[in-house]
Image (cartoon, rainbow, N blue to C red):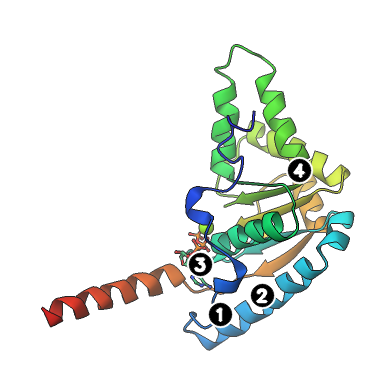
């Protein structure tokens, strides 16, 4: 099953990301720097006390309206830290990928594969869902996510979500948001795009190289 799931571990591109190279000085707006420092502080405390947090099934909800603010990078860094330093089993996927994987199981002759997939999601020691809330909500998506998150909630399993939507605006069924709300520390990321800063820097660097030729 793990081989079938693309989220069995971490996407290749994320393997290098770690907490030590997550920069707080890369944000340009002073308010963003304060916000990211606060966020890093909470995340550090959370990770330093991870076994206690895990015992209580406490997860994280990292969000910002802005795209490119570092949420996925942080989520991947946390995943690497938990796997390498704490020996925790982590599954990492985007919500769209999870939905696609569920749909893929429908083609399978074997009727059991959907429930095995949902079971794998429900029982992973730590489940990270990137871009939660991006998916178009239909009744069946709602019910599948409910099934997974509810199972994790009941069993005190840690779930970490990233989203572009503030928690209060999530359009999920109240049954889902109540559970997320109770067990997740909500962490606001800066409303600033590091992706834009990086691309501006790359452009400037290219222009600099061209100017020298
Ligand atoms: N604090 C940081 N230090 C170094 N690089 C960063 C930092 N934050 C983000 N980046 C880089 O900026 C880019 C965008 O970050 P990321 O993909 O994590 O943003 P995001 O918040 O997940 O965006 P989206 O809302 O579009 O999903 C990536 O290339 C990432 O590696
Ligand atoms: Mg992202």
Number of disc labels: 4
Q: Give the camera-side residue of 32 and 84.
A: 84
Q: Cα distance, mark 1 to mark 4?
A: 31 Å
Q: Which residue is drawn at 67% across and 14% down?
A: 111
Nearest to viewer (mark 4 / mark 3) = 4
Q: Does the residue labelled 3 lie within 8 Å of ligand 1?
A: yes
- Residue position for label 3: 66
Q: Residue at x 66, y 33 (%)?
A: 139
Residue topped by disc 4: 149
Q: Do the residues labelled 3 and 2 touch (CB within 8 Å)?
A: no
How many residues crowd mark 3 within 10 Å: few (<14), some (14–19), many (20+)?
some
Q: Is mark 3 on a helix, strand or loop?
A: loop
- Name the residue furthest top: 109
x and y, in percent, of residue 16 in the image:
52, 60
Residue furthest to the bottom? 30
Give the alpha-carbon distance from disc 2 to disc 4, as whole Å. 25 Å
Asked if disc 1 is less than 8 Å from ligand 1, the answer is yes
Earlier in the chain: of badge 2 and badge 1, it is 1
Name the element at disc 2: helix
Q: Looking at the picture, how far across and down is residue 183, in whole percent?
A: 82, 56
| Residue positioned 60% across, 62% down in the render | 77
Q: Name the quadrant containing residue 50.
A: bottom right
Tell me if residue 173 comes above or below residue 109 in the rendering: below
Q: Which label sits on residue 93?
A: none
Relative to 27, is 51 on the left or the right? right
Q: Distance between the residues labelled 2 and 1?
A: 9 Å
Front residue of this view, candidates 158 and 19: 19
């Amino acid at each position: 099953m793990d081989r079938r799931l693309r989220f069995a571990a971490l996407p290749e591109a994320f393997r290098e990301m770690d907490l030590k190279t997550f920069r707080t000085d890369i944000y340009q707006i002073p308010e963003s720097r304060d916000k990211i420092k606060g966020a890093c502080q909470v995340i550090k405390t959370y990770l330093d006390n991870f076994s206690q947090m895990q015992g209580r099934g406490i997860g994280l909800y990292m969000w910002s309206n802005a795209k490119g603010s570092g949420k996925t990078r942080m989520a991947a860094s946390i995943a690497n830290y938990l796997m390498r330093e704490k020996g925790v089993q982590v599954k990492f996927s985007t919500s769209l990928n999870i939905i696609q994987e569920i749909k893929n199981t429908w083609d399978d002759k074997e009727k059991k594969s959907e429930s095995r997939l949902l079971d794998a999601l429900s029982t992973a020691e730590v489940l990270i869902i990137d871009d939660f809330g991006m998916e178009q909500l239909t009744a069946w998506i709602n019910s599948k996510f409910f099934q997974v998150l509810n199972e994790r909630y009941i069993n005190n399993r840690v779930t970490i979500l990233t989203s572009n939507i503030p928690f209060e605006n999530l359009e999920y069924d109240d049954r889902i948001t109540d559970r997320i709300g109770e067990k997740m520390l909500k962490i606001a990321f800066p409303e600033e795009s590091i992706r834009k800063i990086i691309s501006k820097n790359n452009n400037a660097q290219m222009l600099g190289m061209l100017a020298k030729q």
